[in-house]
């Protein structure tokens, strides 16, 4: 079927789902929460924690934008671009129970965490940051690099796949400026009790940042209920978007205490020239008025319009399904793997009873031992030299899990 641009845009923006459309999401893949019409996958995808497939609606929205960019001469950027970005921010804010004024678009999770670290001016000898070994490796590298300039960086070890709150209690002392963790660990799915962690950190005068890339869209997150100060996430994992589009959350009231360290035109409320014909005269050749909001602090240049337009549609799908329903669909698959794989020699790394969207097991030479078998079975799961990580999503069924178990014999 051939569609014109208006029809593409109409289809791509068809949210919320009609009852008929919602029903169609469940067809074509018995037992899945979302069917093949939305995720027409070739093979078995069990690696969403690495990169989640795009839902068809997001791909259509992106294609509509790219078609316009290819064909338009008089208006090369769609007027819908700004609305698409705005819609993505609004849906992300609702997903984490934040205000849109507390959310900024950033290209990646690490850019968001750097904004926090640099915005707080971390790096002086009197500064202390507490992290844990289940935090993202790029984040640990960030604070390790700042430690070379005087920052005290304390990494709390894991115990039986968990970060013990008693160990955090000992590490977070008076004078700690920031506690930085992954809400859900990419290594094994360990999930912090953010409310307890924030209460502890705040009682010692510290702020809390959470990398939520393995959480948002997959597990519930309420930044108000937890008291979280900062968080960031890219959209290409459980938010079902494309790389290059993500978000930073900064709790209301904290922004005035943060330094500007990035500078670009997105920060400007107004620009007045006094240098060219017919312009008003002034003491300077150019004057700037800088915004005081999130964009005024961390905005720099252009954004990936197509990616945010697609991400808005993916977030609409998550909003329609409901995160609780996504968790309920996935949990039996995680439990089945935790029951079936240990007798086959896989050592559990994920704590029992985890509600995380991923499960990990230790296995020596896992990549060499199982790489060919999974390729032959057309199964995509994450293999490391010493680990296997499985991350099912809304398009998976118990049949997919059984196929993986059989391939790992």
Image (cartoon, rainbow, N blue to C red):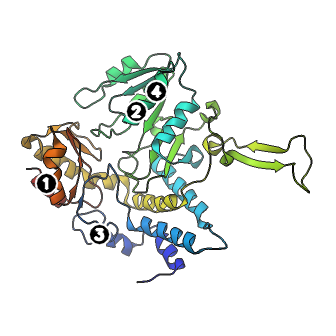
Image side of residue 403 versus residue 391, left or right: left
Q: Position of residue 260 (x, y in %)?
A: 64, 35
Q: Nearer the viewer, mark 1 or mark 3?
A: 1
- Residue 356's label in the rendered image is none
Label 3, label 2: how many angstroms apart (C-alpha)? 36 Å
Q: Circle 2 sits on which residue?
A: 181
- The reply to whether callout 3 and callout 2 are in contact (CB within 8 Å) is no
Q: Nearer the viewer, mark 4 or mark 3?
A: 4
Is 209 placed above or below 100 here?
A: above
- The reply to whether callout 4 and callout 3 are in contact (CB within 8 Å) is no
Residue shown at the point (27%, 72%) measured from the top left:
27
Is 6 placed above or below 286 here?
A: below
Classify the position of the N terminus by image quarter.
bottom left
Q: Earlier in the sequence, mark 1 or mark 2?
A: 2
Q: Circle 1 sits on which residue?
A: 373
Q: Circle 3 sits on which residue?
A: 36
Q: Position of residue 371 (x, y in %)?
A: 17, 50
Q: Earlier in the sequence, mark 1 or mark 3?
A: 3
Q: Circle 4 sits on which residue?
A: 145
Secondary element under disc 3, as helix, strand or loop, is loop
């Amino acid at each position: 079927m051939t569609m014109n641009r208006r029809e593409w845009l109409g289809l791509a923006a068809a949210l919320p789902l009609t009852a008929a459309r919602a029903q169609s999401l469940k067809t074509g893949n018995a037992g899945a929460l979302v069917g093949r019409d939305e995720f027409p996958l070739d093979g078995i995808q069990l690696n969403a924690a690495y990169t989640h497939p795009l839902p068809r609606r997001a791909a259509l929205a992106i294609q509509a934008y790219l078609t316009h960019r290819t064909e338009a001469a008089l208006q090369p950027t769609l007027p819908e671009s700004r609305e698409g970005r705005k819609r993505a921010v609004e849906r992300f804010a609702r997903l984490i129970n934040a205000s849109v004024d507390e959310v900024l678009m950033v290209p990646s999770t690490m850019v968001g965490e750097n904004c926090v670290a640099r915005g707080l001016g971390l790096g002086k000898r009197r500064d202390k940051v507490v992290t844990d070994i289940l935090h993202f490796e790029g984040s640990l590298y960030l604070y390790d690099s700042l430690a070379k300039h005087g920052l005290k960086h304390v990494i709390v070890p894991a115990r039986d796949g968990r970060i013990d709150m008693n160990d955090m209690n000992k590490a977070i002392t008076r004078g700690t400026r920031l506690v930085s963790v992954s809400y859900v660990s990419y290594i094994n799915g360990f999930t912090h009790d953010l409310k307890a962690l924030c209460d502890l950190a705040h009682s010692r005068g510290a702020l809390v940042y959470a990398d939520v890339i393995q959480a948002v869209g997959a597990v519930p997150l309420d930044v108000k209920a937890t008291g979280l100060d900062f968080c960031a996430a890219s959209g290409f994992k459980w938010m079902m978007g494309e790389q290059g589009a993500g978000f930073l959350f900064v709790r209301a009231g904290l922004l005035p205490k943060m330094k500007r360290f990035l500078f670009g035109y997105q920060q400007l409320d107004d620009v007045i020239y006094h240098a060219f014909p017919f312009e008003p005269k002034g003491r300077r050749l150019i004057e700037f008025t800088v915004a005081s909001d999130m964009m005024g602090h961390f905005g720099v240049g252009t954004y990936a319009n197509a990616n945010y337009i697609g991400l808005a549609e993916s977030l609409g799908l998550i909003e329609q399904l409901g995160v609780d329903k996504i968790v309920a669909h996935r949990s039996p698959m995680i439990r089945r793997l935790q029951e079936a794989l240990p007798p086959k020699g896989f050592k559990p790394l994920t704590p029992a009873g985890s509600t995380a969207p991923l499960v990990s097991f230790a296995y020596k030479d896992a990549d060499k031992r199982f790489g060919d078998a999974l390729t032959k079975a057309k199964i995509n799961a994450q293999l490391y030299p010493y680990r296997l990580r499985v991350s099912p999503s809304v398009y998976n069924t118990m049949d997919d899990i059984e196929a993986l178990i059989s391939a790992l014999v």
